[in-house]
Amino acid sequence: MTDRYDAIILGAGGAGLMCAGVAAQRGRRVLVIDHADEPGKKILISGGGRCNFTNLHTAPDRYLSSNPHFARSALDRYTPADFLAMVERHGIAWHEKTLGQLFCDGSARQVVAMLVDECARGAATLRLNAPISELSHADGLFTVCYREGIATAPALVVATGGPSIPKIGATGFAYDLARRFGLKVVEPRPALVPLTLSQDEALFRSLSGVSAPVLARAGRTGFREAALFTHRGLSGPAILQVSSYWRHGQPIAIDFLPDHCEGWLIDMKRSRPRISLASLLAGLLPGRLAEALADRIALPGPLDEQRDARLREVERRLAGWEFRPNGTEGYAKAEVAVGGVSVDALSSKTMAAKSLPGLFFIGEAVDVTGWLGGYNFQWAWASGWAAAHAL
Ligand code: FDA
């Protein structure tokens, strides 16, 4: 028997559940299908189990997309304050950690329970453990065959996310489907991901476990946060952020002393003439890092024995230490994918395909990727909400 709905939503992650709850409470008959055995698995593992569910500084310039203006409409209409109002309505305690990042005090499970409850309030049907075997479109209706049955609807919302963390059921299904319906896909790549280094980056590889606040840059984009040296390369928020902007073959530059202005070392030469670079760095940076940098720079003797030109050179080196990652840790470790269903093919107001208005793409499947810090969930909520209002 074929069940008839107003909308079928593929994927019970953040975007799909938000879309389902809102559309169902607007009176739509909604079916959500997911092949996983529980909804919102990425929400559950997010933010170290506490889900960094939004960011107070959400703005389109904190997203990567081939059209940087695309996200504005949805982000303006469903804001962090709107999501926070829902969180509070459900009595979920939260706190701001840093940089506008809001987390649950308790568990990410509360966010999933909230979204599932919103779906139940609208009587949306949720089918889990339901792999999709066939999907077709004819006479204005989408037909989806899944494990438990067959459903049709005039609207299909694709909310199956991106391919990061395949072990919890992430797939590139949305991209395949988009291509099948003739929509362009911006080639996805892992983002918010640790970078790996080859054996010859001996400096960084020797520092596994050390963390320091730095300014990390890929091209013209820089982030001031912590970098963490790992046995495979570099991680920590500053590196995850620049990884989204990094392209194979490009260098990354690290400023180890971002609070120091040009000329600081020459000023030091005047105020503390007998100090060595190694002792100076030891007072400014974690011990092992200071030692490794001083060894590499190899400045013999105290500062007053150095020419100003040489000190300027040392400053420049410390402010833009270049290294060339040989890759990333891939989708197994990436929080998101950059790229996805081309925004040129979608309406920024409704997320519907311009060429087939009953077909919607929302959340991470779309070529809109946020910075680290709650921006990706805010996009999932906002794009889900935008589509729900067009169903
Ligand atoms: P999402 O991936 O959440 O959901 C897609 C759903 O579709 C899944 O339930 C999946 O099972 C289902 N699906 C996939 N393929 C299917 C198929 N073929 N058939 C049926 N169902 C299918 N962001 C943030 O803002 N704050 C944070 O704290 C974090 N933390 C974080 C930690 C980690 C470890 C990761 C991997 C990611 C984050 N993120 C994050 C990113 C965030 O999780 C991500 O951007 C959103 O979950 C995207 O939501 P979607 O609903 O678009 O996809």
Image (cartoon, rainbow, N blue to C red):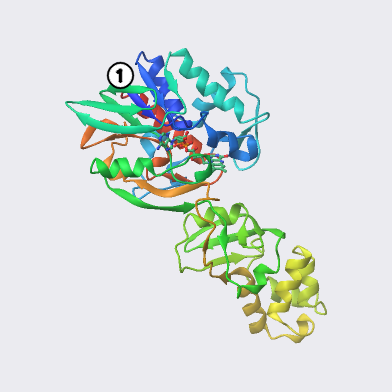
Residue at 32% x, 28% y is: 145
Q: Which quadrant: the C terminus? A: top left
- Which image quarter: residue 172? top left
Number of numbered discs overlaid on the protein picture: 1
**Mark 1 within 8 Å of ligand 1, using the beta carbon:** no
At mark 1, the secondary structure is loop
Residue at 46% x, 57% y is: 245
Relative vertical location of residue 359 with respect to residue 210 in this rendering, above or below? above
- Residue bearing mark 1: 6
The spot of residue 113 in percent (x, y) is 56, 22
Hey, what amino acid is under mark 1?
Asp
- Which image quarter: residue 135? top left
The spot of residue 203 in percent (x, y) is 66, 72
In this orientation, does residue 109 appear? Answer: yes
In this orientation, does residue 55 appear? Answer: no
The spot of residue 219 in percent (x, y) is 47, 64
- Which image quarter: residue 114? top right
Relative vertical location of residue 142 with respect to residue 347 in this rendering, above or below? above
Q: Residue furthest right?
A: 274
Q: Name the one closer to the observer, 114 or 171.
A: 171
Q: Name the one closer to the observer, 191 or 166.
A: 166
Q: Residue furthest left?
A: 139
Check disc 1: other Cα within 10 Å, few if <14, some if 14-19, many if 20+: some
The spot of residue 133 in percent (x, y) is 34, 33
Q: Which quadrant: the N terminus? A: top left
